[in-house]
């Protein structure tokens, strides 16, 4: 029998998977470690989850991050979707430049954006807190929705909406019944990406955050000075579990939908 040769592609794939997922596995594992130091395993325990739920400041920061991410992605969804649709329906010389300018917040370093938002909100006299956080996060989340919807609109046949108009539908009805259902997967994808970017942001949030408001990334970042406790591992494990659960529910409904169509 011939021995199977180990291909370089297999080694590369295994290496990439280990680099990507091994740190995540370690975080989940040490969230159940009885030791406070993540260097040795001293037994299984759930005390860090109990400590997490008793930490009012950390739970408040988590709630703020969820609210901030939800509001930011909702506002970004409306503005980005309308912007993409409007840009797709007009034709002028500077259209390409306007599309390029719409994606600048993604390319500009976050520290520059944070300084710009800080100066702008100070000029307007806005109180720093949840309001400035929502405004700043919405601004840099819009391009994600804009690009997703813009790419989806390229593949949509304009004759479908024109046929609806010929059958007596108003522009609003044609958009609601034809265009919106077709672009909803792109809008949802943009919203999820915008929520993830908002939930994860540290740099911009530090610049526009108020003294009475704290988000989860800022809370974790400030704890680096005194050392991150295992309850952070427990929190990360819970967030990871929530993400996996959402993905499984989405996959289930996609499979169920395919069976219903077939």
Image: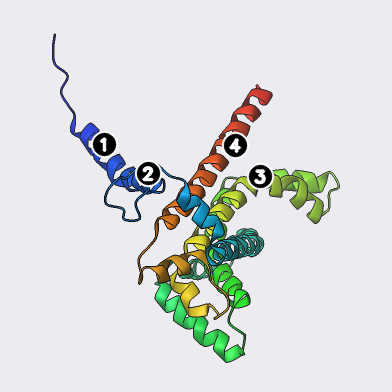
Res 203 quadrant in image:
bottom left
Mark 4 lies on a secondary structure that is helix
Q: Residues within 10 Å of mark 2 (few under 14, many from 20)?
A: some
Which residue lies under the disc numbered 4? 249
Disc 1 marks which residue?
Answer: 14
- Label 2: which residue? 29
For the residues labelled 2 and 1, the Cα–Cα distance comes to 20 Å
Are dots 3 and 1 in contact, CB under 8 Å?
Answer: no
Q: Is 80 on the left or on the right of 231, as rendered?
A: right
Q: Secondary structure at mark 2?
A: helix
Residue 135 rendering spot, x and y as whole percentages: 60, 74
Circle number at residue 182:
3
Whichever of callouts 2 and 1 sits on the residue coming sooner in the sequence is 1
Q: Earlier in the sequence, mark 4 or mark 1?
A: 1
Label 3: few (<14), some (14–19) or many (≥20) C-alpha neighbours in 10 Å: some
- Closer to the N terminus: mark 3 or mark 1? 1
Q: How many marks?
A: 4
Cα–Cα span, label 4 and label 1: 28 Å
Name the spot of residue 54 as percent of width and height, x first.
Answer: 55, 59
Label 4, residues with CA under 10 Å away: few <14, some 14-19, many ≥20: few
Is the Cβ of the residue at disc 3 closer than 8 Å to that at disc 2?
A: no
The figure's colour scheme reads rainbow
Dot 3: what SS? Answer: helix
Horizontal arrangement in the rendering, residue 217 relative to residue 92 (left or right): left
Q: For marks 3 and 2, give the CA distance.
A: 42 Å
Which label sits in the foreground, 2 or 4? 2
Give percent across and percent down for residue 141.
54, 64
Residue 131 image point, x, y percent: 63, 76
Distance between the alpha carbons at the discs numbered 4 and 3: 22 Å
Q: CA distance from mark 2 to mark 4?
A: 24 Å
């Amino acid at each position: 029998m011939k021995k199977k040769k180990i291909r370089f592609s297999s080694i590369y794939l295994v290496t990439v998977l280990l680099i990507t997922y091994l740190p995540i596995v370690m975080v989940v594992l040490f969230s159940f470690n009885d030791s406070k130091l993540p260097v040795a395993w001293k037994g299984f325990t759930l005390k860090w989850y109990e400590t997490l739920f008793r930490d009012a400041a950390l739970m408040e920061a988590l709630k703020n991050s969820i609210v901030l991410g939800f509001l930011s992605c909702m506002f970004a969804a409306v503005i980005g979707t309308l912007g993409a649709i409007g840009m797709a329906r007009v034709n002028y010389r500077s259209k390409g430049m306007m599309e390029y300018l719409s994606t600048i917040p993604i390319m500009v370093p976050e520290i520059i954006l944070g300084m710009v938002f800080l100066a702008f909100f100070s000029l307007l006299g806005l109180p720093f807190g949840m309001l400035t956080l929502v405004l700043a996060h919405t601004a840099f989340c819009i391009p994600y929705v804009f690009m997703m919807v813009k790419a989806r609109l390229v593949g949509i046949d304009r004759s479908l909406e024109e046929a609806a108009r010929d059958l007596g539908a108003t522009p609003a009805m044609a958009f609601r019944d034809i265009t919106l259902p077709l672009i909803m997967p792109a809008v949802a994808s943009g919203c999820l990406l915008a929520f993830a970017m908002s939930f994860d942001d540290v740099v911009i949030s530090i610049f526009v955050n108020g003294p009475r408001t704290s988000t989860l990334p800022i809370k974790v970042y400030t704890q680096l000075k005194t050392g991150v406790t295992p309850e952070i591992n427990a929190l990360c494990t819970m967030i990871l579990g929530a993400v996996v659960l959402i993905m499984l529910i989405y996959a289930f409904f996609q499979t169920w939908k395919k069976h219903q169509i077939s």
